[in-house]
Image (spheres, rainbow, N blue to C red):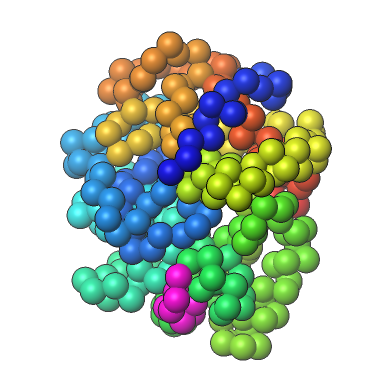
Amino acid sequence: MLDTLPLLRKTDFPRIRRGRLTTLQANLGYRCNQACLHCHVAASPKRTETMSWATMELLLEFAQRQGIRQFDLTGGAPELNPDFRRLVKAARERGIAVIDRCNLSILSEPGQEDLGEFLAVQQVEVVASLPCYLEENVDRQRGDGVYTASIAGLRRLNALGYGRPGTGLTLKLVYNPGGAGLPPEQGALEAAYKRELGERHGIVFDQLYVLANMPIKRFGSDLLAKGNFHRYMATLKGAHRPDNLPGVMCRSLISVGWQGEVFDCDFNQMLGLPLGGSAGPVMLADLLAVDLENRPISVADHCYGCTAGQGSSCGGALAA
């Protein structure tokens, strides 16, 4: 895999600092039942990296000491971590809201047949990847048969009450472009998703998040291999909007890797960029009582992916 970090390090991206910490985002491991082209984690069924229960206990302790009220669980497929359900239960018992970054097809995997029911009982918010409402586009980006499995997963979640008014079970979908371009306007695309998925499959959901592809890991390597890296970076930089800076996700969250190392965001984690203001790796165990507010955030050229156009974050467009 071609490494884009040497091309990203030298940057003129604005210097930013963290605000009040509200969310703890944790990557529970790189194992996934898919191997998507756009994946900035380079996750796949062959990966074995997995967060231990001991590190998860640190997540819970950090949340208690810092007053964190939300966990954002990612992977890979976070549900494939053998302690995923144990962590979710422990967090919910402490009153911590939980987001599950779900790829939908995981609901069809052997051993995960009751996953939807578990998420519903625990009142977990599901943020589910579905890069298009058309089968050919999804399968081209994520693999043959993924669209069919994703639709089956959405139907299962809908049957449990997800995405339906009055249930308290939130279902959000995530779109990312299939190539090297900025995503379309979030509101208009959400309306199209709701119309097409409703008419074609009777599926309902609460909201669509629109994310830009990051020029790192598998997607960045593909850009380099096809000679599109510099063109894509020019697109991101040319669409930079300073008014998106206050809303970038790194200002209100930290990202914890599967070994307990802390980063300013999930993308910095994948690039190995140390927590802002640090000369080297920083472990969560060393931050339990540390106030991170107003600390500098590590930036590089990939950060333009979050401020280009309408903006992009784990919570969708910043200028929606």
Quadrant hosting residue 231: top right
Q: Judge by depth and name the residue closer to the eye, 89 or 74.
A: 74
Report the predominant secondary structure element of the magenta stretch: helix
Give the residue displayed 57% in from the left and 87% down from the top: 201
Give the residue displayed 39% in from the left and 15% down from the top: 280
Position above or below: 222 against 216:
below
- Highlighted magenta segment, given as a residue range: 143-151
Position of residue 268 measured from the top left corner of the image (x, y, whole percent): 49, 32
Give the residue displayed 72% in from the left and 74% down from the top: 192
Indicate yes or no whether the magenta region holds residue 148. Answer: yes
277 left or right of 239? left
Position of residue 153 measured from the top left corner of the image (x, y, whole percent): 42, 76
Position of residue 40 measured from the top left corner of the image (x, y, whole percent): 49, 46
Indicate yes or no whether the magenta region holds residue 184. Answer: no
Position above or below: 309 against 150:
above
Give the residue displayed 54% in from the left and 26% down from the top: 6
